[in-house]
Amino acid sequence: MIVSDATMRALHTALTGLNARRQAAEDNIANVETAGYTAKKVDFEDSLRTAIERGEPRAVDISVTRSLAPTRMNGNNVAIDEEMVGLTETALRHQLVVEGMNTKFRLLRTSIVGQ
Amino acid sequence: MAIIPPLGAVGASPAVAFEPAVRPLTSPGSADEKDGVDFGTAVVNALENLQASHATTDRLAEAAATGDLRAVEDYMVMATETQLATQLTVAVRNRAVESFNEIMRMQV
């Protein structure tokens, strides 16, 4: 888009990644008792960092991998306490990135409207 | 920001680098004599500072996106400062345009 610069695209990618992480954490919590279920993990930070350096912050692959942590007797390895902490951290980071996006839009609006 | 032209172009534009034909009455000495910074330089400096402030805020925003931002308060303070500096710049511009229009309407 004509109004979005590299920083805004990076923030957009971060929102997409954080959303995927939240969804993965929700899946993990929902399946905490499911036999044979292994926890999902989402990673996008390293990819986003290199993408920003390359100047294409939208070209990021958000990877979803399965946890290799030791499983319990039923083949499940979801650690509910870790998932809860991770969910809260993801929510707080989401809030920060949304605030950053709003700041960028506000600056742009100030410049366009002229007051 | 991509849509704002580089400031080198602003400094080089004839509107800013324009030399007034009428010398100020308070300096009857040589024409080259200047006390303090002239208006064009002051404007360009202010815009360059604003641009630098935008660049710093963008860097912090990218750090927030990648999760490398450790001091959230730095980003919030910088973002608010940039917002206020931009509003100040816009207000000064509006006042300048207003003054120009008023002068244009003057009866001579």
Image (spheres, coloured by chain):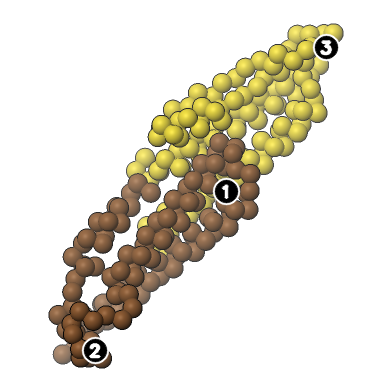
Chain colours: A yellow, B brown
Same chain for mark 3 and mark 2? The answer is no
Element under disc 3: loop
Q: Label 2: how many residues lie within 10 Å, few (<14), some (14-19) or many (20+)?
A: few
Residue occupying image coordinates x 38% and y 46%: A3
Q: Label 3: how many residues lie within 10 Å, few (<14), some (14-19) or many (20+)?
A: few
Residue occupying image coordinates x 46% and y 42%: A8
- Give the x, y percent position of residue B16: 24, 68
Would you name the residue on which mark 1 appears? A99
Q: Nearer the viewer, residue B51 or B103?
A: B51
Badge 2 amino acid: Ser
Badge 3 amino acid: Arg
- Disc with the residue nearer the chain's start (3 vs 1): 3
| Of marks 3 and 2, the one in the foreground | 2
Residue occupying image coordinates x 71% and y 32%: A86
Would you name the residue on which mark 3 appears? A72
Element under disc 2: loop
Q: CA distance from mark 3 to mark 1?
A: 40 Å
Relative to A7, is B30 above or below?
A: below
Would you name the residue on which mark 2 appears? B27
Quadrant for the N terminus of chain A in the image: top left
- Give the x, y percent position of residue A88: 72, 37
- Residue A26 visible in rendering: yes
Quadrant for the C terminus of chain A in the image: bottom left
Question: What's the chain of the residue with tag 2?
Answer: B
Left or right: B46 in relation to A27: left
